[in-house]
Every structure is written in structure tokens, then in C-alpha cells.
Image: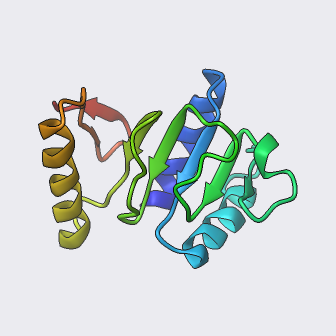
């Protein structure tokens, strides 16, 4: 599930010194992720806010339903089939491979971006939670 896979990837991004945007398709999903990231693990703190925050521009992780890059992020996580902006930063498309709609959307994005000449890689999470490069 996204709620399980996303937080460790955000932590890794912060360890690398990257600023992050997580773009959802709807405000409701953004707000659910906001709540989840505050409590996903008892022993962690993942600094973040939503685009509605007064301090949005200063956040290391910003949750948004827009294509804006308010915090000048270097990596953008696209979830729930949100429509990505023009590619100015590293983009990570996250999708549920067991959901036919999400899978088709991801395939469509892959074909479009590959056709535009972007450098793409595909990673799949194993049942143990490890990420394996597939393409």
C-alpha cells in the first residue's frame, strides 16, 4: 500500500538532502496522507506540511494536489494517478500494480515519457518490501 511504501522513500529522500513534493490527485487524499505521515511509526518524525500551510515554501516534504513546486523540491512523488507537471525535477510515479486503472495509467505515462526521450527506470517492490530495479 502507498501508506506503507511512501514514508520510507520520503525518509531516504531527506537523508540525501532532497526537498520533496508529494502530488496527489485530490485534496482529500493529500489530507489523509498528511495525517498518516504524522503517525505512521511511533519512533519517527517526518517533517512535512500541506500546500495550505503558512510555511509551505520552507517544508522539506510538501503534500499538494497541485502541479506547483512551492518548496523548490528536487524530487516529486506522483500518487493516485495525479497529472504531473512539465518535468523540471526527478519524478517518481507510485502506483498499485494490482489496480488495473493505476497500472494502465502508469503504462501510459511510461510510453509518453519514453517517447519524449526521458531517462526512465522501473522499480518494483518485492513481497519483503525491498525495491528491485526491473527496467
Name the quadrant containing residue 8: top right
Locate residue 86 relative to residue 45 in the image: left or right: left
Residue 61 x/y as whole percent: 68, 44
- Specify whether residue 51 is in view: yes
Locate residue 14 relative to residue 80 in the image: left or right: right
**Quadrant placement of the C terminus:** top left
Q: Is residue 76 above or below residue 3?
A: above
Q: How is the image coloured?
A: rainbow
Q: Residue at x 69, y 52 (%)?
A: 41
**Quadrant placement of the N terminus:** bottom left
Depth order, front residue of 126/64: 64
Residue 30 x/y as whole percent: 60, 67
Q: Residue at x 50, y 64 (%)?
A: 24
Q: Is residue 109 above or below residue 119?
A: below
Q: Residue at x 76, y 52 (%)?
A: 42
Q: In the displayed image of the protein, which residue is found farthest to the top?
A: 16
Depth order, front residue of 61/86: 86
Name the quadrant containing residue 134: top left
Residue 37 x/y as whole percent: 68, 57
Name the quadrant containing residue 108: bottom left
Q: In the displayed image of the protein, which residue is found farthest to the right?
A: 54
- Specify whether residue 45 is in view: no
Q: In the displayed image of the protein, which residue is found farthest to the bottom?
A: 28
Residue 88 x/y as whole percent: 45, 34
Total numbered circles: 0
Q: Is residue 5 above or below residue 11?
A: below
Amino acid at each position: 500500500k502507498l501508506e506503507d511504501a511512501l514514508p520510507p522513500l520520503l525518509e531516504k529522500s531527506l537523508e540525501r538532502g532532497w526537498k520533496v513534493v508529494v502530488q496527489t490527485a485530490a485534496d482529500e487524499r493529500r489530507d489523509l496522507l498528511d495525517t498518516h505521515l504524522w503517525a505512521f511509526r511511533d519512533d519517527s518524525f517526518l517533517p512535512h506540511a500541506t500546500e495550505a500551510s503558512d510555511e509551505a515554501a520552507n517544508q522539506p516534504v510538501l503534500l499538494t494536489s497541485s502541479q506547483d513546486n512551492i518548496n523548490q523540491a528536487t524530487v516529486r512523488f506522483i500518487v493516485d494517478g495525479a497529472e504531473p507537471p512539465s518535468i523540471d525535477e526527478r519524478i517518481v510515479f507510485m502506483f498499485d500494480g494490482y489496480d488495473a486503472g493505476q497500472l494502465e495509467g502508469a503504462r501510459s505515462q511510461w510510453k509518453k515519457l519514453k517517447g519524449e526521450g526521458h531517462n526512465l527506470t522501473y522499480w518494483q517492490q518485492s513481497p519483503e518490501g525491498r525495491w528491485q530495479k526491473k527496467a
